[in-house]
Image: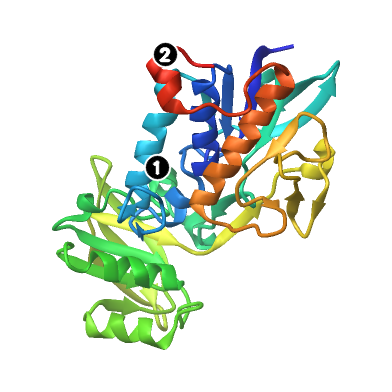
Amino acid sequence: MGEKFDLAIIGGGTTGLFAAYYATMRQMKVVLIEAQEQLGGKVMQFLPEKLIYDVGGFPEITGETLVDQMIEQANRHEPEILVGDFVEQIEKTNDKFQLMTAKGKKLSAETVMLATGTGTFHTRRPDEWAEIPDSRFKASVPTSLMDRSSYQDKKVVIASNSKVGIGWAINLQEIASNIVILNSHDTFLQAKQEELAKLQEAGIEVYYNVKITNFLTVNKELEKITFLHNNGQEKTVEADKLLTYHGLELQAAPFETWGISTAKGRISVDHFMKTNVEGIFAAGDIVQYPGKTTLIASGYTEAITAVNHAHMLINPKATEQLYSTVIYQRGKRL
């Protein structure tokens, strides 16, 4: 049957992380399952270096810092957190949910909360990389800009045909010792003219129609990158750091298989965040209802509502709402 929980949260983005904290604060036994190897969802994947201005209590905060603090908060009451695993099956048996993950993990939960966002985004890597030796290094190349300070005084190469690559280059130009962009196309996808102008003004070197042919590493550290460009001209550049972005592939959660009703890719919920399946709640970007906003802060309030009503479903005598100041002042969690 698997380990038993009061609440299984599927999705470890900001909504799922806050739900894990809030539910454990209310003394629910919680497991959170995240398909990616890292927590933080789209904030960590797409906004780690971006400043966010619309989260209460923070005049401004980077996505990475926000997620780091949310992970610390989520772990306060020690929920079980599983990363790098994908929930494939959810079946309801005798008013309990049986979950099976891609790695064969079996879990049992009284209630479930879906905080998957619109799905799991996987970054594409160029097909020609398959021909390059050193598969271990290729697999480790970052596909998002995190830990910006690690690029200080480094020779940075950005392999990208997207405006995302331009954004990284502009962001790092003040701290990197040198930046080179290797574009496999002859244009940057979705790039605006003003973005291209910033790139030119910054004097960042760009090569087009590139095919990377080799990564030279010494003691597992990158030193040089060799590539072909234009009409097959070969060139080698020095590099301490490599970033890559060539678009995304979306893996949506199998809601229909789980019996969850959706419309236009979103889950319809009521004002209690209930789905059409009794005991399954949803919150965050994946839900839709009149007046819905897709903001980080919106996910927090939806998570609170979902957790409170999941708690009441398990224990009808439970209080619908409790203030954290009262909970911790009493020295116990209810």
Classify mark 2: helix, strand or loop. Answer: helix
| Residue drawn at the location 30% of the way across and 61% of the way down | 225
Which one is nearer the viewer's eye here, 209 or 203? 203
Residue matched to label 2: 330
Q: Amino acid at mark 2?
A: Arg
For image coordinates 63% across by 54% down, the residue present is 250
Q: Is residue 196 shown left or right of residue 154?
A: right
Mark 1 residue crowding within 10 angstroms, few (<14) / some (14–19) / many (20+): many
Q: Compared to 13, does 325 lie above or below?
A: above
Residue 35, percent across and down?
Answer: 58, 38
Residue 276 placed where, x, y %? 83, 40
Question: Quadrant location of the N terminus?
Answer: top right
Q: Residues within 10 Å of mark 2 (few under 14, many from 20)?
A: few
For numbered disc 1, what is the local secondary structure?
A: helix
Q: Quadrant of residue 212?
A: bottom left
Classify the position of the C terminus by image quarter: top right
Residue 116 x, y percent position in the rendering: 62, 43
| 14 and 127: which is toward the camera | 14
Q: Residue at x 66, y 23 (%)?
A: 311
Q: How is the image coloured?
A: rainbow
Q: Which of the two discs, 2 and 1, labels the residue nearer the N terminus?
A: 1
Instruction: Locate residue 27 relative to residue 208 in the image: left or right.
Output: right
Q: CA distance from mark 2 to mark 1?
A: 29 Å
Q: Name the one closer to the observer, 135 or 86.
A: 86
**Label placed on residue 67:** 1
Q: Nearer the viewer, mark 2 or mark 1?
A: 2
| 327, above or below 201, in the image | above
